[in-house]
Each structure stands twice: as structure tokens, then as C-alpha cells.
């Protein structure tokens, strides 16, 4: 569900230069369009040749993942899987299987607030935002009938997946970019690069801090897209993602509907300004940030506090104004 950069920006940091402990490391930065967004890589290495080769390897891995995970590509593996809905199980690529297995786990944990089978509803609401009118009730009802994570059948022993109902369509927007960022960072690590950042459209994963710094400085955007970030966090060896409606929403009949949908009702959320999640990996942070925008705040914070190594902040619009909810462990 989370298809776009919503609320995270890397702040200006990290001047190039040497330190006493690492005199030869220099900062290099690359940005290329992948997965429908800008994927940014920042790394510290001694020379440009090593930096370029490492970045090329990371982007090559992203290209592989895009061919497996992008629903925008009709020839991708996930698109072919959606086209087989209602038929026999299919054995799928290890990356797609890993993402779907993780998505299924988070669907169960969140009671369906996170659900990658939401594709038919997303298509309806994308058109509603363009036309600036509510989706047709008949079409909405039909879409809801084929949405539901329980209709996603996964068999780990065979590495197969089956979409039980014909007309189902997978949308991995709220999990794929986190996984892509994780995998790109693994490639950089395999090249001996210890200090790196990968930002896949706002889903950010980080390794060791830049030379001479306590961590990477990441700014958290306010709920209003026109308002500059109000705070920043200094992080390393972790992942962070924000989801929200600052950039993607439509106002209909006096009500603001987010592009983030509640799969259980078929409607865009109306009060979830944003959710920021810090976790050990990008796939977890990406998925839970979307889920927290759908779940009741107290319920969402209880879930976060039950998960080791995860913390979060949820921002909601209320009649009395903006309200913040924070889990234990979220940076003050």
C-alpha cells in the first residue's frame, strides 16, 4: 500500500573528509529510478572505482528484484502470479516467496490491517483520486469480495503460492521497497563496505555510521507536506520507514481519504496522518508503518511493543488536533 515516499528525508549530513581512525574513506552518493521511485545509495569507501562498482552491483540486484516484485510490470513474477488467481498453486522465485511469507505473517499479526491482496481496491481508489469521486459502490463491493489475506495460500515445504479466488491481485507496494533496500545493503556489505545507506523511496536502511559521526541523521516529516521536518533522529545499523497521507489523498464530500486503504473495509483511512517505525530490517519497518496507519493507535502501539527490536510513533488527526502516540523505545 505504501507506494510513494511519505515523510522521510535524509538530512544534509556527512561531509566528505578524513578522520584519524579512517583517513582514506570518502563519501559517494548515487540515485537511480527503480521500483517506480528514486533509490538512493550513500557509501563510504577509499576510491571512486570501488564505490561505482559496489553501487552498480547493488542496483543490479535491485533490477532482479524489480522483475520479481513489481506489479507495474506485466511480465514480473508477481504479475504472473496474480494472473493465475483462482487456479492451481505456483512455485515462485525465492525472493517473492520470502516477501509473501513475511506479508502473510504481518497480516495475521495485524488482524488484516496489512494485506498484500489489496490490489483490486487500490486500483479502484487510484481512479477515484483521479476522478475526484467515490468508487462505484458495486465495483467496491466486488473488489472487497476478492480481497483477504486468508485467500493467499503459502506452502513453505514446496515454496508454492496459490491465490484462491479468481480476480485477486497482489500489490507489494507496502513491503517490497523495504525488502529491496535490505537486499541492496547486503550487496554493499558483501563488497566490504561497512558504512552505507540505502533509501528506497523513503524506506531507509543503514549500516555503520559515517566516519567520525555517531550515526546517520534522518529527518521525520510532519503530517503536512508543506511543513518542513520538525525533528531528526541519529541512527545506525537499523531501518526506518514512515507511511502517511501527507502526499497521497483525496477530499470527497468534505472528508479526506488517504491512499492507504483499510483492507477490511475497502475505504481509505481518514484520520491517520503518519506512522514511523524503526526496526532491524526494512521489510519489517515498511510493512508495520502501513499497518499502523490502519490500526487503532492503542492497538498498534501494543503490537509494536510485543515485537522485539521494534519501536514506533503514530500521528493521528483528531477533532481536538494532532495527537502523538509513541511506543517504548522510540527515540525521544
Image (cartoon, grey):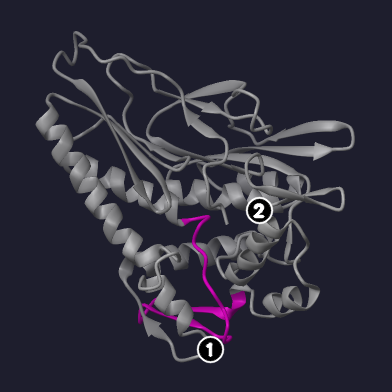
**What x and y, as percent, mark residue 255?**
83, 49
Q: Nearer the viewer, residue 316 or 169?
A: 169
Q: Is residue 8 magenta?
A: no
Q: Which residue is mark 2?
A: 259
**What x and y, as percent, mark residue 184?**
29, 47
Against 161, residue 26 (above or below) is: above
For the residues labelled 2 and 1, say whether their Cβ atoms are less than 8 Å apart: no
Local secondary structure at mark 1 = loop
Q: Residue at x 63, y 53 (%)?
A: 291
Q: Residues within 10 Å of mark 2 (few under 14, many from 20)?
A: many
Q: Residue at x 84, y 38 (%)?
A: 318
Image quarter in which the N terminus is found: bottom right
Q: Which stretch appears magenta?
A: 150-175
The residue sitting at the bottom extreme is: 88
Q: Is residue 174 magenta?
A: yes
In the image, 66: left or right of 22? right
**What x and y, as percent, mark residue 101?**
46, 67
C-alpha span from label 2 to label 1: 27 Å
Amino acid at each position: 500500500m505504501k507506494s510513494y515516499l511519505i515523510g522521510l528525508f535524509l538530512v544534509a549530513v556527512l561531509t566528505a573528509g578524513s578522520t584519524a581512525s579512517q583517513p582514506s574513506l570518502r563519501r559517494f552518493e548515487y540515485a537511480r529510478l527503480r521500483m517506480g521511485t528514486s533509490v538512493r545509495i550513500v557509501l563510504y569507501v577509499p576510491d571512486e572505482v570501488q564505490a561505482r562498482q559496489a553501487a552498480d552491483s547493488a542496483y543490479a540486484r535491485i533490477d532482479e528484484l524489480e522483475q520479481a516484485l513489481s506489479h507495474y510490470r506485466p511480465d514480473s513474477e508477481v504479475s504472473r502470479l496474480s494472473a493465475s488467481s483462482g487456479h492451481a498453486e505456483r512455485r515462485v522465485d525465492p525472493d517473492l516467496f520470502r516477501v509473501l511469507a513475511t506479508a502473510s505473517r504481518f497480516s495475521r499479526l495485524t488482524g488484516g490491517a496489512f494485506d498484500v491482496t489489496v490490489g483490486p481496491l487500490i486500483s479502484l481508489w487510484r481512479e477515484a483520486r483521479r476522478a475526484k469521486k467515490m468508487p462505484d459502490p458495486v465495483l467496491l463491493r466486488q473488489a472487497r469480495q476478492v480481497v483477504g489475506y486468508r485467500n493467499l495460500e503459502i506452502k513453505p515445504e514446496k515454496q508454492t503460492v496459490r491465490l484462491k479466488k479468481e480476480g485477486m491481485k497482489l500489490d507489494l507496494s507496502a513491503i517490497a521497497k523495504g525488502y529491496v533496500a535490505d537486499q541492496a545493503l547486503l550487496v554493499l556489505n558483501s563488497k566490504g563496505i561497512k558504512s552505507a545507506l540505502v533509501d528506497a523511496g523513503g524506506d531507509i536502511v543503514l549500516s555503520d555510521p559515517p566516519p567520525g559521526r555517531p550515526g546517520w541523521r534522518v529527518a521525520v516529516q510532519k503530517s503536512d507536506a508543506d511543513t518542513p521536518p520538525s525533528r531528526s533522529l541519529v541512527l545506525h545499523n537499523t531501518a526506518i520507514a514512515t507511511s502517511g497521507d501527507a502526499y497521497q489523498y483525496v477530499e470527497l464530500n468534505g472528508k479526506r481519504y488517504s491512499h492507504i486503504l483499510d483492507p477490511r473495509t475497502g475505504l481509505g483511512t481518514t484520520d491517520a496522518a503518519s506512522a514511523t517505525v524503526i526496526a532491524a530490517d526494512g521489510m519489517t519497518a515498511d510493512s508495520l508503518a502501513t499497518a499502523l496507519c490502519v490500526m487503532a493507535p492503542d492497538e498498534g502501539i501494543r503490537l509494536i511493543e510485543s515485537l522485539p527490536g521494534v519501536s514506533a510513533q503514530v500521528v493521528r488527526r483528531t477533532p481536538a488536533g494532532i495527537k502523538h502516540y509513541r511506543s517504548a523505545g522510540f527515540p525521544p
